[in-house]
Amino acid sequence: MGRFDDYTADLLRNADIQRLARRGAHHFSINRLEHSLAAAKLSYVTARLLNADARVCARAGVLHDWFFENRDEHQNRAGANIHHYKISAANARGIGESEAVIQAIETHMWLYVRGKPRTKEAWILWMADNIVWLTDGAWSLARFFKKRVNNFMYGSMTRQEPNAS
C-alpha cells in the first residue's frame, strides 16, 4: 500500500489546485486547499483501516472541492455550493482520474443533492468531508466564544508602557 504523499504529489503540483489556497475561508476558518487536504488525509487513513482503496480516497479528497465560484455558470455562492460537485468531477475527469475517484467526488454532497454514494470509497469521502467541515466549524465557534468571553471579562484593556518622565 502506498503512502499519502505518493498518491497525491502530482495533484499538489498542479497550479490550478494550488490556487485553492488563495480563495480565503472555505467553510469557516481554513481555505479550500486546507479543507481538501484534511478530507483527503482523513479519507486515506480511514480507507486503510477499512481495507478500501486508499489511493482513490486520497485523490478524491484532494479533488472533491476543486472549483472556483467566480465562474460564469455559478455567479451566486449558493449555486456554486450546491453544484460544485459537478465542476469538481469534470475537472477531475479532465486530468484523467479514474471512474472510482469521479464517483466519490460526484456523491460527496449526498443529503444536500441527489446521488447516494455507491462505493466504500465514496462513503469514506462523504464522511471525511463532513467531519472536516464540522470540526472547522466547532473550532471556529470555540474561538469566537473565547474572544467574546475575554472581551466581556477584560474589556479592551491594553498594556501601556509607563511614561518615561
Image (spheres, rainbow, N blue to C red):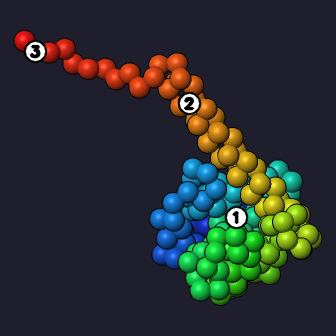
Q: Who is closer to the viewer here, 84 or 79?
A: 79
Q: Residues within 10 Å of mark 3 (few under 14, many from 20)?
A: few
Q: What residue sits right under mark 2 in the picture?
A: 148
Instruction: Give the CA separation, mark 1 to mark 2.
Output: 34 Å
Instruction: Give the CA separation, mark 3 to mark 2.
Output: 34 Å
Instruction: Give the CA separation, mark 1 to mark 3.
Output: 58 Å
Q: How far across and how far down the image is residue 50, in percent?
A: 86, 54
On residue 17, the disc is: none
Q: Earlier in the sequence, mark 1 or mark 3?
A: 1
Residue type at the position of mark 3: Ala
Q: Are marks 1 and 2 in contact (CB under 8 Å)?
A: no
68 left or right of 99 in image:
left
Can residue 18 be seen? no
Q: What residue sits right under mark 1 in the picture?
A: 61
Quadrant housing residue 91? bottom right
Q: Who is closer to the viewer here, 125 or 55?
A: 125
Q: Earlier in the sequence, mark 1 or mark 2?
A: 1
Residue type at the position of mark 2: Arg
Q: Is residue 6 above or below residue 84?
A: above
Report the mark closest to the observer, 1 or 3: 3
Can residue 161 be seen? yes
Identify the residue at horizontal 58%, vertical 82% (top origin): 71
Q: What residue sits right under mark 3 in the picture?
A: 164
Identify the residue at horizontal 85%, vertical 71% (top origin): 113
Q: Is residue 32 above or below residue 30?
A: below
Screen quadrant of the C terminus: top left
Q: Residues within 10 Å of mark 1 (few under 14, many from 20)?
A: many
Q: How far across and how far down the image is residue 20, in percent?
A: 54, 67
